[in-house]
Image (tube, rainbow, N blue to C red):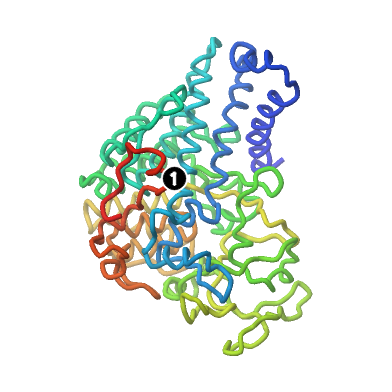
Amino acid sequence: MKKILLSKLLIIGGLLMIFNQSCTDLEEDIYSEVLTDNFYQSDEEFTAALGAAYTSLYGYLGTVGPIAAQEVSSDELMVPTRGQDWDDGGHWRRVHLHQWTSEDPVISVPWDFCYGGISTCNRLIFTLESSSQPGGEAFIAELEALRAFFYWLLLDYYGNVPIVTEFDVPADFAPATSSRQDVFNFVESELLRTAPLLSTNVDISTYAKMNYYVAQAILAKLYLNAEVYTGNARWSDALAACDELVNSGKYGLTGNYYDNFNPNNGNSPEAVFAIPYDRVNAKGFNIVQQTLHYASQGTYQLQAQPWNGWCSLEDFYNSYEDDDVRKSNFIVGPQFNLDGSPAIDGGVEDNDPDGGQLNFTPEINELGPNCLRQAGARVGKFAYEVGQNPDMNNDFPIFRYADILLMKAEAMWRMNNGSADALALVNQVRNRAGVDPFASLTEDDLLAERGREMFFEAHRRTDLIRFGKFNDEWFGKTADASQAPDPGRFDPEVRIFPIPKGQLDANPNLVQNPGY
């Protein structure tokens, strides 16, 4: 069997083992025994327990989950309002314009996603520490590293958040907000402590799980953005963390860029950390529904009609050279059914210049409320299968080796903007894309190349903030200072999201971020 199938069976199977233990016998005295000495007696049982922690990640690509926070708030993707579709109370337009409020789903769902994952990690750590069986230390370290990943996301999104590491807490537990510096310190210390305890294997046993190199990848991200998070640059530390992966010799670029994104992408040598989605057992990856047009159902013989939503901004689409193989990240042009006949948009507007045949145009007439149904290049980076379900089989790479190379190049360039080694690393990525190498390297080159390579991999918002471009003008949006709903909100304050209103209402010890 392929590595991808084995990995999914191991992780999903582990979760099912937990469910079977708790659902096949409803006698209460069995529950208490399973949670302590009668369980966790082997590595297999420890691995099964960890399955619940990893399945927390499936919400990463939810419609209003972390993917939306990173992509739809950036210059890569937008969700225009097309008549009655995708209005959702103006939420998607507010995300695009950086006019979100503390009550919008793009604000609250990532918070819930992260703390849901943290709570699961805390519960499992508590249970493993309560077990009298030996051998749980490495599994606890794995959970602590995964918890640090969730806290890194919170650090990036919200800045100032509570740090909770206990599970056995009173019902009225109301933790106070910790400063962004304190959260940074916590994530760093947890990863530095747990990394040496994690496996250095890069094989079926560690695929889609925390190992030593995943911890280093999180540290690389943490240090690369340290100046944003804390005010103090940590370029040399970012470089050292990247080198742990590069010098290991355990990762490499695929010969074909799209081998990283097809439905059987679990054997990619670039996969540092991935979410192993499955259309039956591990649902949650449904960009096929979010981005394609209603009439695209006939193109791929999809089992459900798509929703005609997410698309790329024209300027971002045009940032690719015509001969860049990565330009196939997008679906553009006239569309056809599987039998070769034209795909017809039965509801095409009278003012659409392309008429009834479905034609995805990079040009977008407006953000809303009357964006044309066919406007916008659609997301095509992850291959769609003929006849597939709304949920996809493609694994999603949270960290990928090409990203490590580009992070290493950036860290080197930040310390020496004439670095030949940094230039060579970027050109290594460009060579795979089939485009000419850069003769020299600028800050704009670095950001643009990251955009072209890492499109729709949930990095863009973070990158734009680090490069000082997140507050810039783009299609339909002016600079943030004039767009903020609160005139007192300054550009830097838009770079972190507000604490969700529901959390503030429930916990009086939380402190709202400035400007909200």
On the image, the x and y values in percent for residue 53 come to 54, 33
Query: Which residue is depicted at the point 36% across and 72% down?
Result: 477
Residue 118 visible in this rendered orientation of the protein: yes
Q: Is residue 269 left or right of residue 38?
A: left
On the image, the x and y values in percent for residue 61 come to 54, 52
Corner quadrant of residue 491: bottom left
Query: Which residue is depicted at the point 44% across and 34% down?
Result: 147
Q: Quadrant of the C terminus?
A: bottom left
On the image, the x and y values in percent for residue 436 come to 41, 69
Q: Viewer-proximal residue, 247 or 162?
A: 162
On the image, the x and y values in percent for residue 417 come to 23, 58
Q: Viewer-proximal residue, 8 or 479?
A: 479
Q: Is residue 60 left or right of residue 484?
A: right
Q: Quadrant of the N terminus?
A: top right
Query: Which residue is depicted at the point 34% across and 38% down?
Result: 508
Q: Viewer-proximal residue, 54 or 178?
A: 178
Q: Viewer-proximal residue, 433 or 127?
A: 127
| Number of numbered markers | 1
Label 1 amino acid?
Trp
Query: Which residue is depicted at the point 48% across and 43% down?
Result: 112
Give the structural element (helix, strand or loop) at label 1: helix
Q: Which residue is mark 1?
A: 111
Vertically, is 138 above or below 180? above
Residue 441 visible in this rendered orientation of the protein: no
Instruction: For label 1, count other residues whose C-alpha is less than 10 Å away and answer few (under 14), some (14-19) or many (20+).
Output: many
